[in-house]
Image: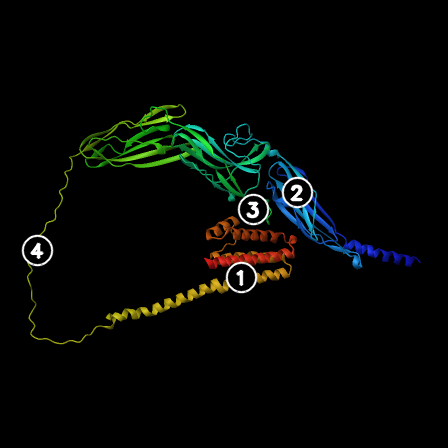
């Protein structure tokens, strides 16, 4: 009786089990962060997981992962635990799960909201709970800039001109001072305030328009930043342009808005970097005219002047060199000097040389003039003092500097002008005919010209080396065509076949090695130079110079980066991804080869 009762229970439970298997799957989607509150620079483990009982997991996405560029992803791992089934008969159930684990380093303080993660199971969407991360300033972010005078405002008050605020990144133009005299120096600095991670080699700034200014650039060779606080948030402030500008006319002059573009990404090797573009705001400078009366050739700044001769005694008709050096703080390009006429001296046009330097935010330099003075008559020749007038904006007063009077002595008599030699038309002499000896007999001689003197003999000698050169040239062309055509194509096909073999053998490391080799070999043949080992930024620049379109370059770089990452994380790669990678690579190779044939 007990055996019969047990069989009855089992038979009765079988339809229930079958009904449960045919019902909707049990799906759980979770989104967790450990810890959920951290400081800038502290690692955070973010896990997105889906578990399904009785269903097939098709996809798992966290759309807000790329939204928060301030959270730098330093590692990514995909875990697929073993799927298993339980039950018997028609009541077999399958349980599976997928988990994406990210290790992130926050680069900026703030509150980061994540929308629910979405999983697709048997064509139906399932969502997790949303997630909030709170990132507080790090211990080192509270320190003041090392050089407050060289850094932008660290704590914003009422004055924050020259910028359009953006919570992620924005440009600020700092102009000091904003009210100047014509010709007075204006210091211009453009800062990039950013809370997101950027690649320094991808930064491409665009200089603002500066109509009405003479500009001296102070080149920035490397990006250095200071940590500053804007509206309670920590930013990195990068100076991207420094210039000393000198207004050339009075009135209100406008400095145009600067522009910049740079790559920002989450740090995930499989995600293409996001291109960020920002535009600043224009800044107005009020330029005042110099107060009257304005001396002749007056400049703005603070200058000194000196003059010297290379010698004090010359012979009449020879030359001496007069050199005048004027230097100080200001724009030496504005300096003008007129040398007065000197009696008995012929003056040639001067040679002018400039030297400038920008130090501690002030432009200084020296302008040198060199005149050639030719003494046309004997005697002492005097050079009067040369004056330089300038307006000092610090004291708002005109000042003058002058050279000492100089003189030199010309000795010897004045050289008389040499008479011009006129050509003489001599009358032609009458010609006298001459005759040779009288011949009393004649004889006929045969033409005995040697073969070496024949016209065709030189062509005959040149024929063998010409044939040899033509044969060598034809063989070289044939080898080059073979090397570019058949040999390159055979190597390319073999690399693809090796990748397919590695795919069939389920060997991700060997597969991605062949993928990288196939792409680089195609580029070698296309560019006619090796590209293996080039950094991706240099490779992108080389492809741009070759005329590759942006879409092909982006796909190519993404595939190389993905393959490099997968070779060292082969455990997280599945067969489906390798098949898709093989199709993408074949399409990229075909586009590269078409590009080569078109050019």
Q: Nearer the viewer, mark 2 or mark 3?
A: 2
Are the residues tagged 2 and 4 within 8 Å (C-beta)?
no
Using the image as rendered, state which of residue 595 and residue 79 is in the foreground.
595
Screen quadrant of the N terminus: bottom right
Left or right side of 31 for 480? left
Q: Earlier in the sequence, mark 4 or mark 1?
A: 4
Q: Is residue 371 left or right of residue 169?
A: left
Q: Which residue is mark 4?
A: 428
Please state which of residues 558 and 451 is positioned toward the viewer in this rendering: 558
Measured in 3D between alpha carbons, the distance from the residue under mark 2 to the one under mark 4, in whole angstroms, is: 112 Å
Q: CA distance from mark 3 to mark 4?
A: 92 Å
Colouring of the image = rainbow
Return the residue at label 3. Answer: 273
Residue 334 percent location from the top left of the image:
35, 32
* Residue occupied by mark 1: 492
Which one is earlier in the sequence, the residue at label 3 or at label 4? 3
Name the residue tied to disc 2.
115
Residue 428, visible in the rendered structure: yes
């Amino acid at each position: 009786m007990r055996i019969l009762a047990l069989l009855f229970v089992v038979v009765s439970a079988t339809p229930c089990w079958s009904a449960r298997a045919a019902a909707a799957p049990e799906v759980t989607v979770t989104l967790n962060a450990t810890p959920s509150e951290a400081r800038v620079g502290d690692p955070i483990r973010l896990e997105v997981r889906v578990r399904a009982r009785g269903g097939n997991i098709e996809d798992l996405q966290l759309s807000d992962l790329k939204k928060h560029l301030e959270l730098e992803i330093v590692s990514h791992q995909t875990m697929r635990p073993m799927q298993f089934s339980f039950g018997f008969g028609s009541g077999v159930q399958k349980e599976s799960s997928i988990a994406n684990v990210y290790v992130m380093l926050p680069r900026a303080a703030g509150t980061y909201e994540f929308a629910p993660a979405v999983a697709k199971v048997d064509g139906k969407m399932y969502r997790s709970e949303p997630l909030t991360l709170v990132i507080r300033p790090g211990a080192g972010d509270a320190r003041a800039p090392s050089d407050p005078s060289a850094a932008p405002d660290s704590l914003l008050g009422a004055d924050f001109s020259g910028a359009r605020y953006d919570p992620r990144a924005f440009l600020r133009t700092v102009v000091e001072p904003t009210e100047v005299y014509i010709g007075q120096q204006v210091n211009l600095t453009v800062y990039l305030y950013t809370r997101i991670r950027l690649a320094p080699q991808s930064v491409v700034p665009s200089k603002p328009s500066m109509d009405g200014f003479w500009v001296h650039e102070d080149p920035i060779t490397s990006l250095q930043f200071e940590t500053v606080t804007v509206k309670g948030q920590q930013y990195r402030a990068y100076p991207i342009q420094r210039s000393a500008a000198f207004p050339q006319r009075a009135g209100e002059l406008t400095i145009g808005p600067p522009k910049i573009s740079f790559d920002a990404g989450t740090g995930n090797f499989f995600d293409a970097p996001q291109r960020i573009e920002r535009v600043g705001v224009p800044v107005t400078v009020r330029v005042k005219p110099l107060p009257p009366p304005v001396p002749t050739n007056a400049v703005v700044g603070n200058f000194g002047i000196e003059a010297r001769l290379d010698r004090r005694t010359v012979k009449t008709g020879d030359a001496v060199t007069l050199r005048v050096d004027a230097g100080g703080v200001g724009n030496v390009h504005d300096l003008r000097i007129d040398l007065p006429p000197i009696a008995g001296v012929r003056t040639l046009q001067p040679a002018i040389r400039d030297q400038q330097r920008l130090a501690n935010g002030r432009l200084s330099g020296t302008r040198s003039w060199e005149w050639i003075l030719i003494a046309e008559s004997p005697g002492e020749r005097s050079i009067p003092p040369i004056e330089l007038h300038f307006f000092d904006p610090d004291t708002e007063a005109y000042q003058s500097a002058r050279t000492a009077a100089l003189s030199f002595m010309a000795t010897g008599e004045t050289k008389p002008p040499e008479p011009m030699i006129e050509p003489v038309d001599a009358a032609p002499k009458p010609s006298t005919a001459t005759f040779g000896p009288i011949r009393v007999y004649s004889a006929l001689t045969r033409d005995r010209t040697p073969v070496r003197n024949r016209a065709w003999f030189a062509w005959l000698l040149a024929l063998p080396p010409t044939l040899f050169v033509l044969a060598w040239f034809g063989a070289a062309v044939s080898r080059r065509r073979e090397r570019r055509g058949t040999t390159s194509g055979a190597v390319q096909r073999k690399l693809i076949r090796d990748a397919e073999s590695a795919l069939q053998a389920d060997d991700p490391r060997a597969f991605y090695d062949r993928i990288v080799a196939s792409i680089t070999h195609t580029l070698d043949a296309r560019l006619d130079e090796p590209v293996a080992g080039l950094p991706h930024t240099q490779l992108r620049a080389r492809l741009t110079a070759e005329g590759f379109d942006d879409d092909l370059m982006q796909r190519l770089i993404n595939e190389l980066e993905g393959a490099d990452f997968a070779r060292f994380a082969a455990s997280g790669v599945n067969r489906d991804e390798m098949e898709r990678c093989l199709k993408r690579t074949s399409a990229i190779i075909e586009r590269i080869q078409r590009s080569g044939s078109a050019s």
